Structures are given as C-alpha cells and as structure tokens.
Amino acid sequence: MSRAMEDILFGDLGPKAQALARAASVTLAVALLALGAAVVWRFHAAGQFEARLWEFFAWQTTWAFLGKGLLGTLASAAMAAAIALVLGLVLLLGRLSRLRLVRWPAVAVIEFLRGVPTLLLIYVCFLVLPSVGIKLSAYWMLTLPVALSTAAVVAEVYRAGVLAVPRGQTDAARALGLTEARVFAHVVFPQALRFIVPALVAVLVIVVKDTTFGYVVTYGELLQNARVLIANYRSLVPVYLVVAVLYCLVNYALSRASRRLARPVH
C-alpha cells in the first residue's frame, strides 16, 4: 500500500471531512431519537404504559422470580463459556498439529459445529439422545449444545490470534532452544490472547444470548421466566423492556471486564 493511500485511509481527517462527519453524526442521532420517540408513542397509544401493566414490578416476588431466571442464565452461560474456552483450545491445537490424522478431524469438527445451528444441537440433546438412553437435565440440554457451538467459534478466534503474533517471536524462541510446546505456551499463546480479548468478549455475549433457547427444554433462564410473567399478568411490552435492560446490563459488564483485561500491564 502506497504512502498516499495510507494517508487517505488512516490519516487524520481534514476540516471538511471533520465537518461532514459531525453533520452525519448529528443527523444519525436525530434520526435515532425520532425513531425512539415514535416507538414510545406507539406503545403509549396502545396502552402499554398504563399503571396496571407495571404495578407488579413493585413486588419483591417479581424481582425474586426474575433474579432466579437471571441466575439461571448466568449459570448456564458461565459453564458453556468455560467449556468452550477449554474445548476451543483443544480444537486449536488439533488444527495446528502437523499430523494429518489429528489436524483433519479437528478441522472437520470445527467446520461441523460452526455450520450446525445451536438450536438444532439443542433438539438433538432434547429429542434424539433420550431415544438412545442418554438423559440429560434441562441445564445440560441447554448448556452443552451452546458450549459445543461456541467452542468451534472460539477455536477460530484463537487461531486468528496465533496467526497475528509476529513470526519473529517464534523464531527467536526456537533459537533459544525452546520446544514447540513451550514456544506456544510461553510465547505465542499469551500474546495471542491480548489480540483476541475483544473478539472473545463478543463470543461470550453471544453465549449469553444463546441461553434464551432455554424455552425449548423449559430451563428456567431469564427469558423463560419473563414468559411466565407475561402469561400471568398480560404485560408483554413492560416485561420485555425490563428483561432487555437486564440483558444490556450483563453485556455491558462483560464489555467493561474486557477493557480491563485488554489494558496493558505495567
């Protein structure tokens, strides 16, 4: 890439470009505010802000029920993430292996799990496994498919991080006499993790969202409990708005944690 092209793509914006960017930002902000106002007005016109649809949120039992669902979501997501991070590393090592008998099966597993929808894996655990005598609890019928589906994505994220490590780092480590295993464990992988923290957090956010498939196996996660509240109190929009805020708070906490992890250590 020429120097002139680099200046165009990555250089500082000139006065006209800055003014255009500010105008575009203001226009987009106004459009989003107008859209939000229109949505709120439609909800108001439909009577979704009436007090009777919100009054049960003043009850402790309501928040206890939602809190129980949130704990169910976090428990499933945390276990699925832990399994995915470990299994993803195993799949990465298999994919990077020089032995074809190891590398090809690892590639096949990764591509299969990436191609199969998580919901289909849940149905396999829910409908197929019991027919052959393998019975799982609702927790594992949700957690295991989410973990398997996520592990394949994590393996590819790991691989991208490994490939981003400068080749000179591995050459220098080999020159010092380190074995391939020690080069990977002490030089390559720690640096790769620094590169992929944002991508891993994005994957973890998807894991939290995938737990909403818990309704298939009647697992008591947040959205499943929200459906129970809707059925009992006929309050569709208020319940979904509150649940959406809870999901946003969880994902925001993950984003904040990722910034701390990505911060360089002094």
Image (cartoon, grey):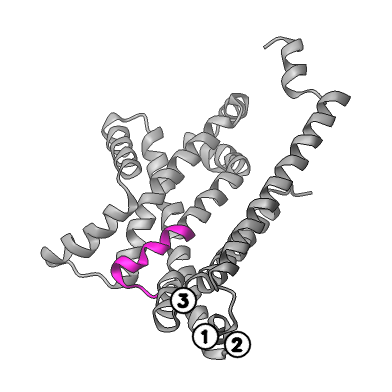
On the image, the x and y values in percent for residue 90 come to 39, 46
Badge 2 amino acid? Ala
> Magenta segment: does it hold 219?
yes
Which numbered disc flags the more N-terminal residue, 1 or 3?
1
Residue designated by label 1:
62
**Residue located farthest toward the bottom when viewing the structure as drawn:** 60
Q: Do the residues labelled 1 and 3 touch (CB within 8 Å)?
A: no
The quadrant where residue 124 appears: bottom left
Which residue is more in the foreground, 94 or 80?
A: 80
The tag on residue 80 is none
Badge 3 amino acid? Gly
- The vertical placement of 89 against 230, above or below, is above
Q: Give the range drawn in magenta.
A: 208-220
Q: Rounded to the nearest whole Å, what is the CA distance between mark 1 and mark 2?
A: 8 Å
The tag on residue 69 is 3
Residue designated by label 2:
58
On the image, the x and y values in percent for residue 69 come to 46, 76
